[in-house]
Image (tube, coloured by chain):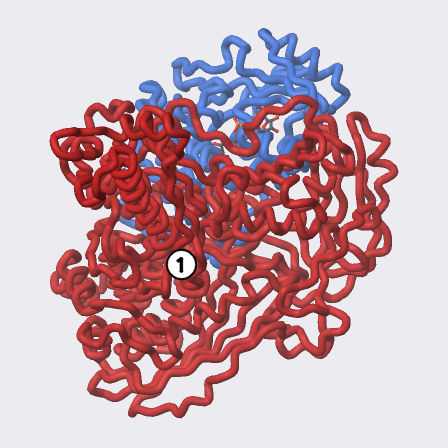
Chain colours: A blue, B red
Amino acid sequence: MITSSFEYVAPRSIDEAFSILRDSDGEGKVLAGGHSLIPLMKLRFARPSILVDISRIDGLSGVDEKDDFIEIGAMCSHAVVARSNLIREYSPLLAHVAAQIGDAAIRYRGTIGGSICHGDPASDMAGALFATGAVLVVDGPSGKREFKIEDFFTGFLETTLDPEEILLAIKLPKVSGKYSFEKLQRRSIDWAIVAVALNQVGDGLGVGLVNVGPTPVGFKLSLTSDEDTSALLEQFSEIASSLTPPSDVFGSSEYRKEMAKVLFSRALLNLV
Amino acid sequence: MSLDFTDLEVGRGEEKLVGSPYRRLEDPIFITKGATYVGDLEFDDIAHISFVRSPVASANLKNVDVSEALGQPGVIAAFTAKDIEIPAIINWINKVIERPFLAKDKLRFVGEAVAMVIGETKAFAEDACEFVNIDYDLTTPIIDPRQSANNEVSLFEGCTSNIVASIEGGQVAQIGEVRIEAEFVNQRLAPCPMEGRAVVATIDGEMLTVYISNQAPHSAKRSIIRYLSIDEGNLRVITPDVGGGFGSKIGTYPEEILVPYIARKLNRTCRWVETRSESMVSLGHGRGQIAKVTLGGDRDGKIRSYCLSVIQDCGAYPEIGANMPALTRWMTSGCYDIDSVDFNSISVLTNTNPTVAYRGAGRPEAAYAIERAVDMFATEIGMDKAEVRFKNFIDPKNFPYQTKVGSTYDCGNYEESLRRVLKLANYDELLVDKENRIKDKSDLLLGIGISSYVEITHGFPAKEFGSVELISGGKLSVKVGTLSHGQGHRSAISMIVRDVTGVDPCNIDFYQGDTELIESGVGTFGSRSMQSGGVACKRAADMLVTKAMEFLSNHLDVDLDKVEFSWHEGGQFSVGSMCLSWSDLYRLAKNEGKVLKASENYESSSPTFPFGAHLAVVEVDVETGKVHLRDMFAIDDAGNILNPLLAKGQIHGGLAQGISQALYEEFIYDQDGNPLTATFADYGFPTAAEFPQFRDELMQTPTSVNELGVKGIGESGTIGATPAVVNAVMDALSVYGISHIDMPLSPEKVFSAIKIAKRSK
Ligand SMILES: Cc1cc2nc3c(=O)[nH]c(=O)nc-3n(C[C@H](O)[C@H](O)[C@H](O)COP(=O)(O)OP(=O)(O)OC[C@H]3O[C@@H](n4cnc5c(N)ncnc54)[C@H](O)[C@@H]3O)c2cc1C
């Protein structure tokens, strides 16, 4: 319950952050809200020698409107995402999901960037970003790179991020279709046993699934007609049968699979 | 809201305070400055203790090597069993069983203390713990209590079996047209007080002072004296504010004895404040009972026989948990008048954290068993669940009532409490709603769960100390041997003393939890405090008034019957036309070198049996198995209520814990004895968001066991609420023919039960 010792720095610029990370020989870690990283450190599962707090770097916590997309700074807290007028207008699913994370204290500290970079399959934000088709903007020693969300996660708590790279922002297409989010949880503060996010993007239905495998997952289903849900259910069922959700004290793998189907059909019904 | 009590609508006038919702005297400082816990106390040059704990459930311990740890920065010392010169604790039930202060020869559960490291800071100590090397050979653990009972190999050498205690019985003939048989598990719970265990030991010459977060400082003192062989006069035990205990802080743990031991060894102030991770695996757990019930009854609703067989999981060492079946036994037949009742139990060892008393301690288990069984009986004979209870309640005219297992219930009116809760909940409308949902084939089924409970408080009557002394300015100093750890005793006892003496509670200094100031004390557990310490203070206050009158009669040389006292206007003594206040009396006595003080060691003649009826309304989502507790109603009767705010605080906290056992909490070990729920991420500790607004009312049937007419109210919630919630879920699921699911009723368990039921239809 007490971390091993570490150094702490809070650089004012992104370049400073890069140089500290470079000098730390892979022992450094970016600190965002700390809601995932600090518990791991307290259990001594993670032992970074230096924490680079990126909360004081300008330009990482804004929400900006561009031509056909919006750009959300990686350091935006869930509370900011839930309240932002731009996000509510152009990506209402994301705001809706952010508002349901943890409790108020968690939403004020946890960030969208941390939620993605942690690579946790239980991240609701990852589910919403999958359903929306997000692009992640990353910077580091090998220069600025952009990833589609589906290319970002590589394994349980693993992403394609290099230890010296920092996620700067998330780009989301402006969408105005229907969306819904169904989350099954034990206590109100718990992570999802399973959650399903749906977002109508163009002529397809973006699907993001939470806690149904080693990484967050998502895919697109084609929407033929609004009314025909049975075809969608069938498509989904097929995909669901190949999922490999975790088993833990909150639910077995088998149960999670079944719940993914139940929540998917509820999410379809509840599209607004 | 103002914090200085100027807006108090009660307590200003010329009315008795007892019975009024007088605001807690404890709160202003808690809200403004904050409480003072052991971890907050400041000392110069303090050393910090960390424990290294067993990572495995069962092993032969070959060697513990601290040499590498000793070389780490900031490390003062490190110790293993070899360095501890105190003889092992001889077990209170079985003298063959010894518990070493640090594990020796064997590792018996994950979390058992193996070594200790003392550092200049807590962080240094924690870091160095990682360099303690434990060398062991794994042995096969026993985790399941059922298996332990039948196991050929016993966990302790010299013991013939793993059964450490038993109660004989259970040969009762089963009578009646219908027979219900079932097995119910009361799962293990982690008590999770906000403040974990914490101890500071500090030395000044010969004098040892120990600050400890517990529920019974005088008994902690006795334990430390016993194991440290220290003179009574050289030890002072102080308990400052305590952030919850729930029974887990009644006893004194080996770690807590080691802190003063090491402080003396190093001649330095030492502190140990347990981390949450330690607390989850090594602060005593609650419950851990498997019950088999057999209920016999007739189709007209009359219950004729009831037998309860219990297996109690003691964990690795038999602590107070081993004795829980004795308390369960007392309450076997609950609120019902049953011809033939019997009970038997065994308490068995396993390779898990020892069990202790946990809020309700043995009585929730009893209430759960009979209230579940009565519901199953009602379902079987097709009778309304309230009606079946009305048919079997002990007649209110028959109190005091002796049960078939020998408990003597002081007073009760079970019918009235059930009638009131049905009314409060609009029972008839709920039944209609439930049926409509079934008819509509709704996916959200409604369930209504009733539980009528009776329990025992102050189960082990023992002398309790209380004293009242007149001090400067006409104020009073009140001392008591009980130990409030959140309950609000300062408020309750000050109100009692005020109503006798007239002295405003703000002018009453209240002391508890210091063995130097308080001559003797038992502590707070088993909902005993008001019926022991409260009565003692009441009597002491009465005696003080008498003493003061006697003093005045001597002083003025008038007959005692010429001296009058009235509690009005702050307390007034009058002799003829002369009128004196407490402050005048203090001055007069002081001039004569006299102290006006009275103390009482009060021992009540018998326990009391509070009762009530709880009703839970749940909605069960049949597609996911998720249970939503929509409403919780409670009628509780703990006799005269000293202060409804305090009583309701106890009831609400208890309801939350009781509901939480039904729906969320379970401390789980895998088959190798590894804890799977050792953090709050996995252990289902609830938050306020999990509960509806409780709808509760107090009922008052005073007891004649004590002059205050009070019974205990600390545990009612955990006793009544748990079966009410489970009964509600089973009521909802009865359409599927499901009769029982063990707690906690997680979505997956409920979902699986529905799935299986649907398949077999
Ligand atoms: C009790 C509790 C309940 C929660 N419930 C939910 C829930 O219901 N749903 C949900 O989705 N989430 C939930 N969360 C998660 C929480 O909201 C955070 O989003 C999450 O913990 C991580 O975000 P953070 O900002 O705290 O990241 P941190 O813990 O600071 O970082 C996490 C990881 O990401 C890395 N990192 C962070 N930012 C960057 C960056 N910009 N570039 C590169 N690497 C980076 C860090 O180095 C670290 O490895 C819960 C958390 C808690 C403690």
Q: Residue at x 62, y 64 (%)?
A: B318
Q: Residue at 65% x, 17% y: name it.
A: A8
Q: Is residue B354 left or right of residue B330?
A: right
Q: Nearer the viewer, residue B186 or B641?
A: B641
Residue A261: x %, y % from top left: 41, 53
Residue A225 seen in the current view: no
Note whether residue B674 is visible: yes
B406 relative position to B278: left or right: left
Q: Who's the residue at 38% across and 54% down the image?
A: B532
**Which residue is at 35% across, 77% downward?**
B761
Classify residue B656 as left or right of residue B448: right
Q: Is residue B4 above or below residue A270?
A: above
**Picture quadrant of residue B626:** bottom left
Q: Nearer the viewer, residue B400 or A210?
A: B400
Which residue is situated farthest in the front direction here?
A: B557
Query: Nearest the camera: A126 or B382?
Result: B382
* Residue B353 against residue B342 in the figure, above or below: above
Three-letter code for the amino acid on which mark 1 is drawn: Glu
Element under disc 1 = loop
* Residue B561 image offset from top left, x and y in percent: 18, 45
Q: Does residue A94 appear left or right of residue A148 in this picture? A: left
Whole-percent x, y for residue B502 in the image: 23, 36
Disc 1 chain ID:
B
Among the 4 quarters of the image, the one containing residue B479: top left
Q: Which residue is labeled 1 in the image? A: B603
